[in-house]
């Protein structure tokens, strides 16, 4: 990694731009009005610091590839049109992503772009798992089905587990536990099920997302309150999950701290998160008829021994046994945390989405 950075709180008065290289560590607070302004700031800064490493290609992470994109691909006009066409499925993300790609093409017209989709890795999920049991006409006209997300992260986990186990990894459960969380079942490198669905709201309870609840609760809320569909969408995405149950925060670090100081609601939030995680791990075990490898990744998965312990508590019967000395470690590289007599090999894998995107760019464009 030569340089890293981020534009955050785009569209708000107090946006931030951070940029880091081995010589530079800068953090600016300024108004970044939209994604076009953000990307010109990023490209301008990168070009000013490119020295002897010019920009040969650009990789973009795109949340939704709909039914079109089963793999990453090189950007052309048709690709941009399709990303925009799918945008109603992920309005907050895909329109912004399309505008970023177009800005890159304007500023650096000779530099090719590659798009990598969070949904692509899940396009192998069979119909029995992706189909919603709703009427055909609704499913077809609205493209309603399970798509799955965090696919770039799960694919990186699958690739890394294959290398770490030297090919012994045939039935893998990948646990991406961060502010957004999802768990995937991966058979011989191919995804067969995942917990997120039509949107990234489904599955596990998350930092501010409720995860899977009885769908009838939504219509019941609409019928019995003044909330409209938009309000409920906002509540389920931004005001639920760990934040709602604890009444305190969505940050797992702070929840662990508060529960250690006796905060009952924070303890309940953590217990519920652990319960949900175990439940979905069990589900993926059933989906594949057994498991030989399990891996944790993302903020909480890769940094928190407590969360990993909670996720596998009482699961020895299914073959999961953590070595607590290994679990207590923190490393920047992947490492094994399963006990020697654990039937399932258990790993921690620091998230590698950017690396995965870089590999795709290289695969699709060739060169070094
Ligand atoms: P991510 O979405 O992958 O960036 O993960 C962010 C989340 O990971 C934060 O909101 C925290 O809840 C959690 N997290 C990060 N570091 C730790 C840690 N050391 N212990 C527990 N949770 C952590």
Image (cartoon, helix red, strand yellow):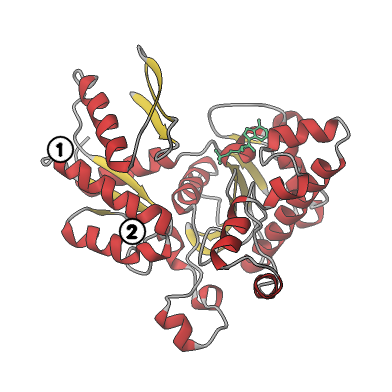
Q: Residues within 10 Å of mark 1 (few under 14, many from 20)?
A: some
Q: Who's the residue at 63% across and 40% down the image?
A: 301
Q: Which residue is mark 2?
A: 71
In depth, the one of 346 and 217 nearer the eye is 217
Residue drawn at x 68%, y 57% as measured from the top left: 281
Residue 25's image quarter?
Answer: top left
Q: Secondary structure at mark 2?
A: loop
Ligand 1 is found in the corner quadrant, namely: top right
Q: Earlier in the sequence, mark 1 or mark 2?
A: 2
Vertical position of residue 38 compared to residue 141: above or below:
above
| Residue bearing mark 1 | 108
Q: Nearer the viewer, residue 33 or 210?
A: 33
The label on residue 165 is: none
Name the residue rendered at 46%, 62% in the picture.
122
Residue 223 position by quadrant: bottom right
* 206 or 298, nearer to the observer: 206
Figure label count: 2
Query: Horizontal and vertical percent for residue 44?
Result: 23, 27
Helix, strand or loop for disc 1: loop
User: Which image quarter holds the N terminus?
Assistant: top left
């Amino acid at each position: 990694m030569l340089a890293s950075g981020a534009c955050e709180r785009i569209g708000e008065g107090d946006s931030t731009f951070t940029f880091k290289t081995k010589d530079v560590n800068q953090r600016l607070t300024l108004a970044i009005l939209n994604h076009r302004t953000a990307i010109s700031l990023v490209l301008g800064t990168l070009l000013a610091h490119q020295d002897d490493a010019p920009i040969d290609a650009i990789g973009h992470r795109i949340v939704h590839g709909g039914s079109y994109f089963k793999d990453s691909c090189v950007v052309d006009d048709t690709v941009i049109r399709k990303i925009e066409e799918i945008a109603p499925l992920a309005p907050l993300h895909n329109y912004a992503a399309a505008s970023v790609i177009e800005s890159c093409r304007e500023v650096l017209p000779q530099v090719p772009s590659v798009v990598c989709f969070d949904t692509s890795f899940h396009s192998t999920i069979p119909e029995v798992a992706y189909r919603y049991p709703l009427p055909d006409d609704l499913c077809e006209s609205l493209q309603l089905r399970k798509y799955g997300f965090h696919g770039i992260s799960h694919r990186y986990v699958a690739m890394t587990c294959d290398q770490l186990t030297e090919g012994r990894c045939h039935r893998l459960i990948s646990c991406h536990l961060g502010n957004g969380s999802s768990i995937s079942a991966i058979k011989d490198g191919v995804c067969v099920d995942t917990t997120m669905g039509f949107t990234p709201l489904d599955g596990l309870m998350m930092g501010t997302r409720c995860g899977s609840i009885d769908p009838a609760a939504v219509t019941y809320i609409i019928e019995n309150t003044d909330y409209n569909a938009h309000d409920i969408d906002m509540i389920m995405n931004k005001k639920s999950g760990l934040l709602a149950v604890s009444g305190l925060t969505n940050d797992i670090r702070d929840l662990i701290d508060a529960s250690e100081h006796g905060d009952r609601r924070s303890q309940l939030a953590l217990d519920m998160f652990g319960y949900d995680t175990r439940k979905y791990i069990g589900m993926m075990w059933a989906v594949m008829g057994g498991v030989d490898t399990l891996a944790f990744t993302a903020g909480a998965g890769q940094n928190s021994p407590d969360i990993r312990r909670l996720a596998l508590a009482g699961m020895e019967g299914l073959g999961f046994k953590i070595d607590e000395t290994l679990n207590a470690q923190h490393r920047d590289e992947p490492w094994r945390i399963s006990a020697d007599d654990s039937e399932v090999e258990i790993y921690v894998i620091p998230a590698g989405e950017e690396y995965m995107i870089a590999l795709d760019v290289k695969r699709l464009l060739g060169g070094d």
